[in-house]
Amino acid sequence: MASGFFAILDDIAALMDDVAVTAKIATKKTAGILGDDLAVNAEKATGFLSSRELPVLWSITKGSLINKIIIVPIALLLNFFFPIAIKFILILGGFYLAYEGVEKIIEFLFHRHANAKAAKDVIQDDKAAEKAKIKSAVTTDFILSVEIVIIALGTVLERSVTVQILTVSVVAILATVGVYGIVALIVRMDDTGYKLVKHSDDKGFLSVIGNLLIKSLPIIIKVLSFAGTVALILVSGGIFVHNIEFLHHFLPNLMSTIKEFAIGLAAGLVAVGLAEGVKKVIPLFKK
């Protein structure tokens, strides 16, 4: 009886070791998307009254958890019954990520001043604006969560069903807790800074730290936004390269990072062009 019990414990320990290894690999594979998720949601959770930042972030976090609760079982079932669908979903998701990345670049290059002017007109405690930001963040999170779950699943396709389920679940939980935990720290930086400045009467070491936190927040948001945009394009290019045979063997001597960025950028330009074309065609049918 005792030997049987310890044998079960050994099996569980071995399984946990396998899951720890596969989860580590899967997390590395999804790091680019997690970085973009971090940048997007740090931006979405700012721009409100200080008292509303954490409630907004909590609403987005709950939406992210619901997204993953929906996505994880569907991805596992598709992989079991209709595995070819995983590749098509990845490619479609790749086009969406490329579209998002290139659209951000176009907005920065050609519509930056218009967006800055519009941002000044936003009322910080506007409930409608708050709901719109939450909805936008949760929708973006859904797409990114699909990619995270499927990429994580792709790293354990050769493993047992149990390892697949546990690995994907662990990555999904880590993605949510990790990303939104860091976002919570980021969005409260300025508030913490103001408190330090007030507590120290704007004098001494605490005042220096407080002012540094206040001034650092917009810089961090901009850096994360830039890194997230690059990550979107790189991740999308990587998806195309690893799932489309022709692209996988295309220019084999070119550095993989440059190749993936170039392919992601090209896909994004095509996606943006198609989206703009559809926007112009739809009004014609309405007439």
Image (spheres, grey):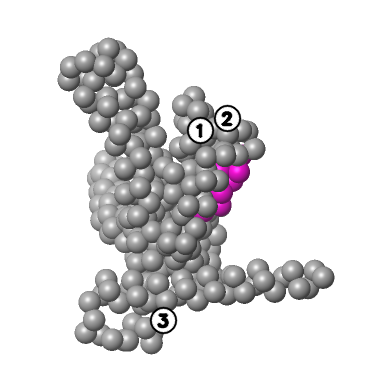
Q: Which residue is mark 1?
A: 48
Specify the quadrant of the image occupied by residue 253.
Answer: bottom left
Specify the quadrant of the image occupied by residue 124.
Answer: top right
- 138 in magenta: yes
- For the residues labelled 2 and 1, the Cα–Cα distance comes to 6 Å
Query: Label 2 sits on what residue type?
Result: Asp
- The answer to whether residue 226 shows anywhere in this view is yes
Q: Which residue is mark 2?
A: 125
- Residue at the image point whose x is 32% and y is 61% from the top: 29
Circle 3/circle 2 CB separation < 8 Å: no
Looking at the picture, tell me which residue is in the foreground, 177 or 212: 212
Does residue 120 sit above or below 52 in this rendering? below
Quarter of the figure with the C terminus: bottom right
Looking at the picture, tell me which residue is in the foreground, 177 or 217: 217
Pick out the residue farthest to the right: 287
Instruction: Tell me the element at label 1.
Output: loop
